[in-house]
Amino acid sequence: MDRRVRVRFAPSPTGPLHIGGVRTALYNYLFAHKHGGDFLLRIEDTDQTRFVPGAEAYIIESLKWLGIEASEGIGFGDGPHAPYRQSERKAMYKDFAMQLIANGQAYYAFDTAEELEQMRERLKASNVDAKYDAITRGTMKNSLTLSEDEVNRRLENGDAYVVRFKLPRKEEVKFEDEIRGWVSFNTNQLDDKVLYKSDGMPTYHLANVVDDYLMQITHVIRGEEWLPSAPLHVLLYRAFGWENVMPKFAHLPLLLKPEGNGKLSKRDGDRLGFPVFPLNWQDPFTQEPSSGYREAGYLPEAVVNLLAFLGWNPGTQQELFTLPELVQAFSLDRVSKSGAKFDQNKAKWFNQQYVRKLSDEALAPFLSSALVNAGLNQDFSDDFVLKVCSLVKEKISFTKEIWDYSNYFFIAPKTYDEQVIKKKWSDKIPALLLDLIANFEQLDSFTHETVEAAYLQALAKNEILGKDFLQLFRVIVTGVAGGPPLFEIAALIGKQETISRLNHALTQIPSKI
Ligand code: GLU
């Protein structure tokens, strides 16, 4: 019988979560939901030397912001396999290490740091790969070389030890990766990894495999950097006799720099001006800040959508997907093997698409808060603010840009785009402006249709072509060369304001030419 799909995201709290990690979480979430299964969040904090305060809370806040909710785990209400933080599961791992020793798959090693260093020096001198393995273990201080009495004496004495995995010599380890197909490693490339230390802490490998087994994980979906660990994990499943419930592995492609090769790093983001983390972060030790998508003005839906496309595609032309749509469309066989290049323009494009989808009501608070900052919030009605949102929405990529693109609705321009003035102003313009003012004065109803008709009439009378004046008219009304349909802007700011801006231009511009 097929097992219920259970996947996990298992980050180590060693700093802010890179967007590559967020993508791993997202793919796990999508896979779980697609198959009606469970998505767990497990915190792998066994390496206390790399622990960074605040990192765990950051991971949880990031996932919540993006709507990548876990069905079990830290920050998401736990579940039947609690605790989900490995440091709190510490007591469980020793028995598993001992089980491997009892069945001859692992051994105690007592070598000191100096002895390990000497071994490495010795091997390097004879040009041999310096590692603790099937050959060198016979020359070291471990329960394979020491007598049983000596081992017991050391253990009773409380000597420091580690438990090492007894890796088979020159064995081909093969497994089928869901993304890469068959992958094979020879054990002579690996070493006898430490699984457990006498301070009571397991290492990543033991804790990771034991927890995946205990938490009934069916698929391990993680970054490519963990591919070299996979053969050891396969061998651990065999050593425990858990082969029949071994999860399937899927190693995701790396996120690459926008140009050149190599993994996308914070440095690339700083250099090229985009975040590589979901939220702002300040390193608690060095105080170094890192910028986040949320604070940079990205919408969570856009970040989810853009991350989904870094390494996966639906096989159709569709690019915009909500989270539930991604769940429907997602499959591991459409995840690519090769690295995914990050494209900051595409990221911005995704955000722009989602900003356009926002309702005027959803966009309005961003504009209102800018109005508060400018001390203008009392002067304009909610309805006016909503209408500005509706006109400007198409023009912005980020919600925080709304004020830059709309301030002329609220404040008459004091300066004018110089290039346009230089190019389009002529001796014929003042007369045209006076006719425009006169025509506008006549209008009882000031709509974009009546404004346009009055405008065309004035142009015809002055024998000026629309192409020679429209942009100048825009600059006179707004100060800037681009924006939403001009007659709609005029209609919204109203008759008096439009006329007053024309008068202002008439008195200001000629003196500056
Ligand atoms: N703790 C590992 C990490 O930080 C988990 C790797 C895995 O998913 O097995 O990414």
Image (cartoon, grey):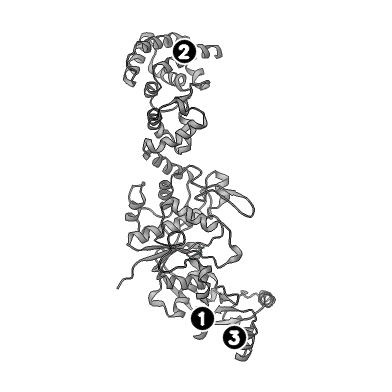
> Which residue is depicted at the point 48% across and 9% down?
427
Label 3 – label 2 distance at C-alpha: 95 Å
Farthest residue toward the front?
A: 378
**Label 3, residues with CA under 10 Å away: few <14, some 14-19, many ≥20:** many
* Residue underneath mark 3: 143
Residue placed most toward the observer, 58 or 237: 58
Residue 149 position, x and y percent, is 62, 91
* Residue underneath mark 2: 503
Q: Quadrant of residue 128?
A: bottom right
Comparing marks 3 and 1, which lies closer to the viewer? 3
Residue 109's place in the image compared with 299, above or below, is below
Secondary structure found at label 2? helix
Of mark 1 and mark 2, the one earlier in the sequence is 1
* Residue underneath mark 1: 168
Residue 293 position, x and y percent, is 49, 46
Label 3 – label 1 distance at C-alpha: 16 Å
Residue placed most toward the observer, 12 or 425: 12
Of mark 3 and mark 2, the one earlier in the sequence is 3
Label 1 – label 2 distance at C-alpha: 89 Å
Q: Amino acid at mark 2?
A: Asn
Residue 241 placement, left or right of 270:
left
Q: Are marks 3 and 1 in contact (CB under 8 Å)?
A: no
Comparing marks 1 and 2, which lies closer to the viewer? 2
